[in-house]
Image (cartoon, coloured by chain):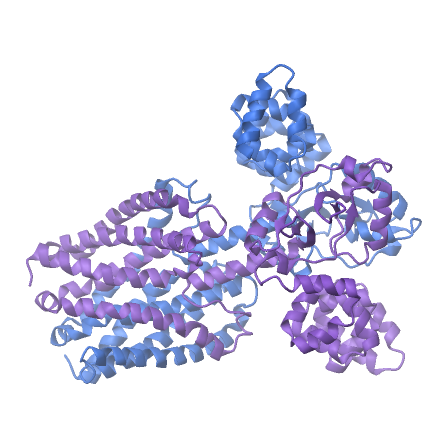
Chain colours: A purple, B blue
């Protein structure tokens, strides 16, 4: 459907007087759909279309595009069109764009904004990526404690058009400190003559500008809020983070966790946006690290060369034993990394976690040890090396569960992302140690060299 | 702080006349914090506290508790207190609770609701878990096309107290079909005499009741909405899904994906809520399946027993080669499963995906093949089996990338969750085939038996 609309637009713009017809066609579209259409039309139509749209609609459309594309369009538009458009964009989108382009380009755009707004943008740009402050918008509605409900509603009617967050008004005192949040619902139902200070709860949930964005998402979702005010160290309101931005945070962090757990560096863009060369670079680093870690398995096996030469059958079970250990560890890591990410488990739970992994590992170890024994029997090797592989299986599984229980919590404690302990990393660690255990047990139990 | 408030409450309730003081203490708390306090106080205080709170506050508090706990409290309260409380709860919470308890208990509670509301709840209860319909609330504001803006605002003022979604009003025609959505902002700015049908866009984004909840989350986040209307097959409005519920969906599905990718069945509760016995059951199934799959590696190696006996050094590289293959596959799977989950990649992209994995795999294969060769040289085995392990490394890596590119897309096509192809599963598949390749190459290149 978008393709059809896009080609109709191209056709209308090529025709004299087609503009009015075009506006009628696109005006009922939601901003997101409109932004897809903007990407779909011919480059020359794109600029015409954006400049024909009212500034607030055009700004909303632009916000769905990538920062670089936003700049490309703004840059090519005449200043008369681009300036109101930039002013109509929400402040967090402006910050994202300014940070994505060259500082010289950013400065030129900043000059188009009124002084007061520019200062706010400047402040927002100082917060490092990944913090609540970096996601905050200043397009919220701030009201004063001393105002009446009536005056507040009047103010809201006046500024609502420019605000991104309209369901709440943030109450500040004379020092700019956040003291309360009132919802439209409360305002509509309250006595119009009452002062905000009187209907206030004097209890407000906010986050600091330097709070981690994941922590902000956790708080917002816990309270079922649609927006979360952000304050500085003195409690002054500096912006508001909205649920749509935190929604993206949760989704992107989950994707990063999965990619890290899979043993790859996280990709910055989507799969198809990432060129093969970048895909290679993101993956090869960890593959080589893991390779280096795993290389010592060769040393371990060579160390037991004489043992192996005496009983070649021991080699049959190498992949099965270390594979099962790796699988067990990979399960534990996946469960714990997610529990750490959503805040259910912390470093203080170390002993409890180890206890549980030891218990679960013991149950799994007995089961898998028995399975390994049966496998040896089925290969006619039950009497020969059955007991060795069974006991090795048991211990490797327990060992894998405990190591995989320890490492993510330890990394979390050291403020390193626990998702760094990927399934592949655990497999690598368990492989060498598991093999050492296996061959040592074989030597002892079978009396080999 | 919650502990302190809780003990103060326990103390106030034990004292005659302490109730008024108590209400003053708890009334400024947000509902979530209040719910934590309710869980913290003594059981007898809990019931007293809930019955002292205004019904709408108590209902909000209850919604933060687990469905079973909600029922336990409702059940123990007198009917005079419990009935208005149940009526004040949002309909999606009521549905969740009714589905969690015994049908007899549910029926008793349903009888407390007015007929019309009961029918709506009955309808919502029919949608299977995981669909948009199962998350929908009926506590939204529906208005008629024929109404004026003035009448609409008046209606909203009247019903806002009971509604969960207050930023939007949903416009329906005489048949109950959803025709438009108007925001409070639009209403406040519109001419009070205008009819809704005239200010309408006649363009509304909605989902079907049977739409998958992940798909609903995707649409909501794409459009940056805070609520998404749900319609039946005839386009009639049956409810609204809110962003907070879909936020939880995104988070929970990510957790499930991670756990599945780690090779475990997803846990239903948090890590510490899950007893060790359940943890064992959730994990042992896949471990045994993987074990069975991996058992054939023993057969493969035994098949090449004579080859191995002639050149025991070949065994040194077994874990390294299959480990590297498994790691490569695990990377591909993690990247693709997430891309499928967020809808960036589909089955139609199969050829493109395979092409990219072949290209990336080739680059990775050459790198890792070279690394394997160097490792063989460092062990003094460069001339002997260096070329064999290098070529094997190359092919195993390419093979792993391609298999791991194919399987998730195939499962997605078959409507099986692609996260079923865990890192451990790919490792298992690659292990046996990789070993076969390795020993076959060794036979040919070294001229062994």
Residue A170: horizontal and vertical position, in percent?
74, 47
Q: Relative to residue B272, is residue A442 drawn left or right?
A: left
- Judging depth in this view, the residue of B51 and B69 nearest the camera is B51
Looking at the image, the residue that sits furthest to the top is B16
In this rendering, is residue B261 above or below B64?
below
Residue B142: horizontal and vertical position, in percent?
78, 44
In this rendering, is residue B16 above or below A75?
above
- Judging depth in this view, the residue of A173 and B375 nearest the camera is A173
- Judging depth in this view, the residue of B296 and A386 nearest the camera is A386
Q: Relative to residue B423, is residue A36 drawn left or right?
A: right
Q: Which picture quadrant has residue A133?
A: bottom right
Residue at 69% across, 60% down: B223
Q: Is residue A1 visible?
A: no
Give the position of the N terminus of chain B as an image quadrant: top right
Give the position of the C terminus of chain B as an image quadrant: bottom left
Q: Relative to residue B278, is residue A236 drawn left or right?
A: right
In this rendering, is residue B164 above or below B246?
above
Residue at 23% across, 72% down: B317
What count of labels does the image hold? 0
- Judging depth in this view, the residue of B273 and B392 nearest the camera is B273
Residue A361: horizontal and vertical position, in percent?
29, 48
Q: Which picture quadrant has residue A144?
A: top right
Residue at 8% across, 57% down: A446
Q: Is residue B14 visible?
A: yes
Residue A216: horizontal and vertical position, in percent?
59, 51
């Amino acid at each position: 459907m978008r393709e059809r609309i896009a080609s109709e637009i191209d056709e209308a713009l090529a025709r004299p007087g087609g503009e009015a017809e075009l506006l009628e066609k696109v005006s009922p579209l939601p901003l997101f759909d409109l932004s897809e259409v903007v990407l779909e039309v011919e480059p020359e139509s794109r600029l015409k279309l954006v400049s024909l749209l009212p500034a607030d609609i055009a700004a909303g459309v632009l916000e769905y595009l990538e920062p670089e594309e936003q700049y490309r369009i703004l840059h090519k538009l005449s200043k008369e069109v681009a300036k109101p458009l930039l002013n109509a964009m929400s402040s967090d989108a402006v910050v994202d764009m300014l940070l994505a382009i060259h500082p010289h380009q950013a400065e030129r755009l900043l000059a188009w904004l009124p002084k007061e707004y520019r200062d706010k943008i400047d402040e927002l740009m100082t917060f490092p990526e990944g913090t609540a402050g970096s996601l905050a918008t200043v397009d919220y509605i701030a009201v004063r404690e001393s105002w009446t409900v009536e005056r507040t509603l009047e103010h809201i009617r006046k500024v609502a058009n420019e605000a991104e967050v309209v369901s709440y008004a943030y109450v500040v005192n004379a020092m700019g400190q956040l003291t309360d949040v009132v919802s439209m619902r409360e305002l509509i139902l309250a006595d119009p003559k009452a002062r905000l200070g009187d209907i206030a709860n004097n209890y407000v949930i906010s986050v600091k500008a330097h709070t981690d964005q994941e922590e902000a998402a956790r708080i917002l979702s816990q309270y079922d809020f649609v927006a979360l005010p952000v304050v500085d160290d003195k409690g002054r309101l500096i912006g508001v983070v909205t649920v749509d931005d935190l929604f993206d945070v949760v989704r992107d962090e989950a994707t990063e966790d999965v990619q890290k757990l899979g043993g790859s560096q996280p990709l910055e863009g989507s799969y198809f946006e990432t060129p093969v060369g970048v895909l290679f670079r993101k993956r090869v680093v960890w593959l080589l690290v893991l390779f280096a870690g795993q290389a010592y398995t060769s040393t371990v096996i060579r160390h037991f060369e004489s043992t192996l030469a005496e009983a070649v059958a021991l080699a049959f079970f190498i992949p099965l034993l270390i594979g099962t250990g790796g699988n067990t560890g990979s399960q534990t890591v996946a469960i714990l990394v997610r529990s750490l990410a959503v805040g259910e488990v912390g470093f203080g739970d170390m002993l409890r976690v180890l206890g549980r992994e030891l218990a679960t590992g013991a149950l799994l170890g007995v089961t898998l040890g028995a399975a390994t024994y049966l496998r040896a029997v089925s290969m006619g090797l039950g009497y020969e090396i059955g007991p060795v592989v069974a006991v090795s299986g048991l211990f490797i599984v327990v060992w894998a569960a405990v190591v995989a229980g320890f490492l993510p919590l330890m990394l979390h404690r050291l403020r390193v992302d626990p998702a760094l302990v990927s399934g592949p990393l655990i497999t690598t660690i368990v492989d060498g140690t598991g093999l050492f255990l296996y061959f040592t047990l074989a030597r002892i139990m079978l009396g080999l060299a």
